[in-house]
Image (cartoon, helix red, strand yellow):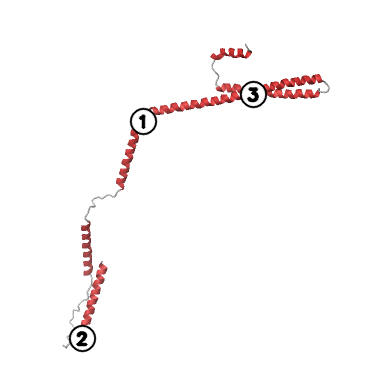
Amino acid sequence: MSKLGKFFKGGGLSRSRAAPSPQEALARLRETEEMLSKKQEYLENRIQRELSLAKKHGTQNKRAALQALKRKKRFEKQLTQIDGTLSTIEFQREALENSHTNTEVLRNMGFAAKAMKAAHENMDLNKIDDLMQEITEQQDIAQEISEAISQRAGFGDDFDEDELMAELEELEQEELNKKMTNIRLPSVPSTSLPAQPARVPSMSSTHRSRAASSRRSEEEEDDIKQLAAWAT
């Protein structure tokens, strides 16, 4: 059995132990990355040093130059292995971080689902329908009340229009009669005029009398028309 197989077989003994948390595993991986990075830097320095020794002993001591190149090759091989290990650890760390993120997301989603379920436990769909119907009815009632308030109130204004018009005409006629009685007519002189000798009216005097009478009649008619126009 290979050593790797023995390692994993022996690891079964520790399965009963509690699994590490994602935070602990990530911390271990970061520590390993930091250690390998330091080892990588050390190997790079050793490779440069061995290369310098090989160049230094190349012409004077070939044996020492060859030994330096052999060590450089070993260091380069180790450096290549460390590069591969770092890539693997980096991939594992990213996968673990994603897994931890997904776990937290699912945990929070489950927590939210439980909270939503608890909030809906006290809700009844039938009660919700009844509540919405009641709200709609109350809104309709409020609308009817608003419309009733906004309408013009009668308060017993049902009167006969013809009767009102007849009363208005009577009031206008009374007002017109008052204005007619307030018109002042010319006063008649109290003293008697001196007697004149009787004479036979001639044709010219008779004609003047008729013309004067006609003018007075026309003036009176004009006054009556103006008074009637002003009254209306």
As shown in the figure, which amino acid type bears the numbered disc 3?
Answer: Leu
Q: Give the quadrant of residue 172.
A: bottom left
Q: Is residue 76 visible?
A: yes
Q: Residue at x 23, y 74 (%)?
A: 221
In the rendered image, the residue lying farthest to the right is: 60
In primary-sequence order, the first of circles 2 and 1 is: 1
Callout 3: 10 Å neighbours few (<14), some, many (20+)? some
**Residues under numbered marks 3 and 2 in contact, where contact means CB atoms less than 8 Å apart:** no
In primary-sequence order, the first of circles 1 and 3 is: 3
Q: Give the quadrant of residue 90.
A: top right
In the rendering, which numbered label is found on residue 125?
1
Q: Could you say where residue 137 lies in the image, as x and y percent from the top left?
A: 32, 38
Q: Is residue 39 visible?
A: no
Query: Label 2, on which residue?
Result: 205
In primary-sequence order, the first of circles 3 and 2 is: 3
Of 33 and 66, the residue lying toward us: 66
SS for dot 3: helix
